[in-house]
Structures are given as C-alpha cells and as structure tokens.
Image: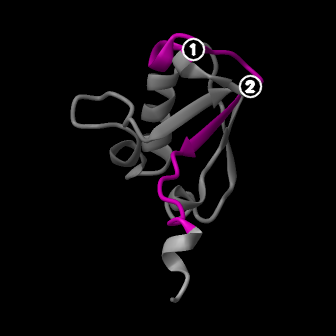
Amino acid sequence: MIKVRVPTPLQQLTGGKKEVELPVCDISVRELVEKLEEAFPGVRERLLDEGGTIRRFINFYVNDEDIRFLEEENTHLRDGDVVSIVPAIAGGETDAAQRRPN
C-alpha cells in the first residue's frame, strides 16, 4: 500500500481527500501517476506534460526525499512509502517601500 498526500488543487478530483491509499507497491513514480489517473481521472494532465514528464512546477517527495535527487519519475516505490505531491508556489510581495503612499 502506498499513501499519497494530495495537494489542495487536486482534491477536487479525489472527492476532497487529502490523502489516498493505493493498493500497489514495487512501481515507479511515473506508474503511480497512471494508477492515480485510473482512480481519479484528470490527475495525469495536472501532473504530467504532453511528453509524459512531470511538470516543472510539480514536486514529488517520497518519504520526504525530493525525487529530483533520487531517480526522478523512475524512483522506485515500496509498500509503506508515503508520496507527497507539492505544487511549486510562485509570487511574492512587492517591496514595502513601493507600496507605501507618499
């Protein structure tokens, strides 16, 4: 069994679930995305680009390890692993001096 932590933007596809468990093991992260797609249609297009590569603004962590420092989407998953899907957050605040009225 692999536990997947689902980010808020994808929870509309998982029926509001923050975590889902899939009865799979001994698969890659890429294969996990396909299993998620089977269970929750629409997930794949949010996570993978047209070429099947993980979108650059989506980060995957396996047991809190960033897969970019492991084997990326080929990272092997085992029974009991926890996968976190984390969309990158962009933006920020302008300089406070620029916001101050004169």
Residue 47 included in the magenta stretch of the image: no
Q: How many marks?
A: 2
Tell me the kind of residue under disc 1: Phe
Q: Residues within 10 Å of mark 1 (few under 14, many from 20)?
A: few
- Residue situated in front as seen by the camera: 47 or 98: 98
The residue pinned by badge 2 equals 63
Q: Which range of residues does the magenta coloring cover?
A: 69-95
Decide: is 1 above or below 44: above
- Could you tell me which residue is drawn at 64 percent across and 19 percent down? 25
Tell me the kind of residue under disc 2: Asn
Instruction: Name the quadrant containing residue 96.
Output: bottom right
Residue 62 % position (x, y): 66, 25
Residue 76 included in the magenta stretch of the image: yes
Decide: is 65 above or below 35: above
- Estimate the spatial distance between the alpha carbons at disc 2 and disc 1, rounded to whole Å: 13 Å
- Which badge, 2 or 1, is on the more N-terminal residue? 2
The residue pinned by badge 1 equals 69
Q: Residue furthest right?
A: 80
